[in-house]
Every structure is written in structure tokens, then in C-alpha cells.
Image (cartoon, rainbow, N blue to C red):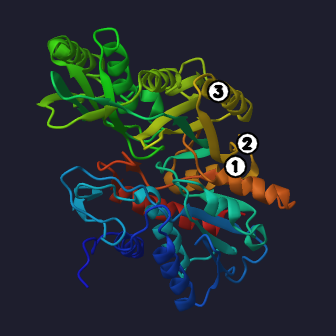
Amino acid sequence: MERVLAGLEPKKFFEYFEDICRIPHESGNEAGIADYLVKFAEDHGLEVQRDAFNSVVITKPATPGYEERKPIMLQGHTDMVCVKEDDVEIDFAKDPIPIYIDGDFVKARGTSLGADDGHAVAMILALLDNDELKHPLIQGVFSATEETTMAGAENIDGRWLKGEYLFGLDWSKDDTFLLSCCGSSEHCFTLPIGDREAVAREGKVKIHLDLFGGEGGHSGKDIGRYRANGNKLMTSILAGLTEVADYGLVDFIGGNQTNVITEWAKADIICAGKDKDAILAYVKKMGEELTTEFMLTDPNLTLVVEEEALADEVKVLAEKDKEAFLNLMELLPNGVSSWIDQTIYLAKSSMNIGAVRFHEDTITIRTLVRSNSDHDHDELLRKLKTLAKICGAEDAMSCKALAWDYVPDSELQREVRRVYKDLFGVEPGFTIAHGQTETGIFTAKMKEQGKPIQAVNIGVVTYDVHSFKERMSISSAEKTYKMLCAFLENIK
């Protein structure tokens, strides 16, 4: 089998990463990669457990002389966010990720790469496969569905876990350790709608609005960059149009993932021919304003307008349903709602309006809330319940995860600082983040069982995750592997 990543170091890391890219593993479709992990464990004579959620735990005993050192968990998730450019043909349920090398980066042709969190899975396997490495007991903990429900981490049997130190590898830096991250909750706002109203085609025009080209990005780490959210901007256009002329709203669609800043949205409206010019003029003005407003954050943001004559009778939302929808969309928060620090650099709480869909008798709006403060999170949830009630919608919450609390100057942090400085001659950085990892779930799970555990997160440098621009640094993979080998061998 010819390998795209042949010749790259560390050899085993890139071999395992390429294998992972050949196995479909979008969230909810992790059975194939779970099979692969179980076979790896069996081939290497290692203890393995697998559960109904397709999460896997592989345990390797300590090498002689290291039996008394603290056992270490290495943790990552097996699923990926699958997105692609419009002109790329790929079936993520069965096709491999089309990877290639570009300078210091591994990339995918027109799709997300899945380095989030494929680099963690490959790194753990490479370490477990290193029989020359001296180490305490190691557990590779591979959780499923992190990108959607986090049900994998939530449901792993805590009795399987033996670590006292936890290295989470769902992080995109190799010189700065993560010490705390946000909790989250997913919400589906469901707005009931009545029968649509028929509009005769005589004297009417259909106008299609297409907003695209936003930068998108991760709804955690990129949310404070003020990037355009297609759902929010399309709503703003439609709400403004209500003050220009009467129109009927036929359809609205935007975004696919709650954890991706929405790059696009589309809407279809119907208006009288006499109002067409006023509407087109307003939309053109809005397009020009958005180009200026987001020229630094979203330089490729584009609004295209197409008009067409009606061939048949068209049905639109009743006016009260259109008003309820636009009110709810305008009032729902999007972006950062509070900051941790006075410099307005570290986001504390935020919400991303991820996906909007019209159905036969309902409209659904799927969102993701993040917060580094459980108190702040609960306060925001109360406000969302109130808002939904006022607008006549239902707020169904799922997947609520607690924040990973910051613990200053832990024993593990001191050990990490010591070994890192001995290895590289400089001290590492430490930070907290508005992105979410599963570390908070695992530390809480261990605490409930009376098992003390300390945690940090580190990883291979990656950029633009959750987008088709995603890329992973080759040189960083080598550095991170070297670093983790040193930690396993030297941390006491």
C-alpha cells in the first residue's frame, strides 16, 4: 500500500494518522475506528475495553522499575467534524479523507482534515507501540461523539480508568499547556408554525438571497474574533426588509453544525412586482455594508441576489409566524456575551447559532452555548428559557457538560514545567480556553469515585479546525511526540 505520508517522522505517528484518515469517523459513525483500535490492542497483546458508544480504553502495563510511578491517562476523541467545499464530491460515510503534504503541513483537498482529534488518536497509538520507551502504566482513552453529544466521555465506565495524571491531547499547541476550559450545552429551539399561506403568481416575483464566503471556524476558540455568522446576518437583512416593503418568507436555511461558526445562509422571498426595485436596492445596500463591516474578519463574504418569475402558486409563512421567527432569531444571542479578563481577550460565555431549518409545521434553530463559569452558564440558560417562552418557542437542551475548573500550581503542572524546560531549555506557557475538551468530564468522573487526578492538555499544532482549511504541522508532530516520550519517562 502506497502511503501519502511515507518518510515523515515520527514514522509510526504518521502511519497511524494516515490509517485513521482512511477510516470514516464522522461523529456518530465511530464503529469502524473502534474496530481498528480493538484490533491494535489485540495485535499488541494489550488489555482493551470497548463500550456500546464505541469508546475504547487500552491499557499498557508499566515497564520494570516504573511500577510505583503515577499511572498516566492519554486521552483523545475518535470522531471528527466533516465539512467540505461546495464543489468537492465526497461521501464522508465511506470515502477516505483526501490528504496531501504542503510544506510543513498535512492538509486535505477541499475537506476538513480531522486532525481534531485524529492527531491525538495517532499519537497515543504511536506511544503505545513504542516498546523501547520507559513508562508507568499508560491508558489510552479514546472517546466517541465528542464533537456532538460528548456521550462517549460521559458514559465511559469510570471503573476502567486508572490514571492519576491525565494528558488530554485535544489541544492545538505544543508550547502552551491548557489548564482549564469551558463547559457547554446544545439547544434546539423549536418554533411551531401554522399552515402556510398561498400566494398567486400573478404580479409576483421570487427573490433568492445567497450569503456565503464567511471565514467560519471553531465556535469556541474563534468566537471572540467577531467573524460573520450567516444565520444572524441573513436574519438582519430580512428584518430590515420588513421596513422597506411587504414580502412573504418562503424558506430559510443556514449552517450545518452547532460547533462551527456559520459561513453561509440562504433565503427565498416573494414580493409584488411593484416592490421589487425597492427590495433589490435595499439588499444591494446591505451587501455593500456587510462587505465593509467584515472586510477584516471575513474578506470573502458575499451576498448574491437572484430574481425569477413564478411558474406556480407559492406558499409563504403566515405573517405572524414570519414575525415570530425573525423576533426569535434577532433576540437570540450570538457571539461572546461575557469576558474573563478586563483586556477582553479571554471569552467567558458565548453562543453560536449553528443551523436553521424550515420544516412542515416547525422551524428549528440549533445552537451551542459555551461557558468557563458554571454560574454564568446557568444564568444564560435561564435567560434562553425565558426568551423562548416569550417568542412562543420550545428550548430543548441536551449534552450539558460542566466546565473544567482551573487548579493553580498543581503537582502535575510543576512536573510538566520541569521536564519541558530540561528538554527544550525554556519554560512552557500555561493558559485557559473557551474551547471545550472532555477533560472536565473525566476529572469529574474520577472525583465522583474518590480517585484523585490532575490534568493538563497539550497537542500537535493545528489551524482552522472544523473547516476545509484545516491543517496540521508536521514539525509540531515530531516535537509533541518527543515531548510526550519525555513526560512518560521522567515525570515522577
Amino acid carrying mark 3 in the image: Lys
Identify residue type, mark 1.
Arg
Q: Is residue 330 above or below residue 262?
A: above
Counting other residues with Cα less than 10 Å from the Cα at mark 1, is it few (<14), some (14-19), or many (20 or more)? few
Of the 4 image quadrants, the one containing the N terminus is bottom left
Mark toward the viewer: 3 or 2? 3
Q: Return the residue at label 2.
A: 409
Q: Residue at x 38, y 41 (%)?
A: 255
Q: Is residue 85 visible?
A: yes
Which quadrant of the rendered structure holds the C terminus?
bottom right
Image location of residue 175, percent across then percent down: 49, 47
In the picture, the disc for residue 389 is 3
Crowding at mark 3 (Cα within 10 Å: few <14, some 14-19, many 20+) = few
Q: x, y (%) of residue 382?
A: 70, 28
Q: How far apart are marks 3 and 2 (CA)?
A: 44 Å
Q: Distance between the residues labelled 1 and 3?
A: 49 Å
- To which residue does mark 1 refer? 414
Q: Do the residues bearing badges 1 and 2 touch, measured as CB atoms within 8 Å? A: yes
Q: Position of residue 297 (x, y in %)?
A: 32, 27
User: Of label 3 and label 2, which has the lower sequence position?
Assistant: 3
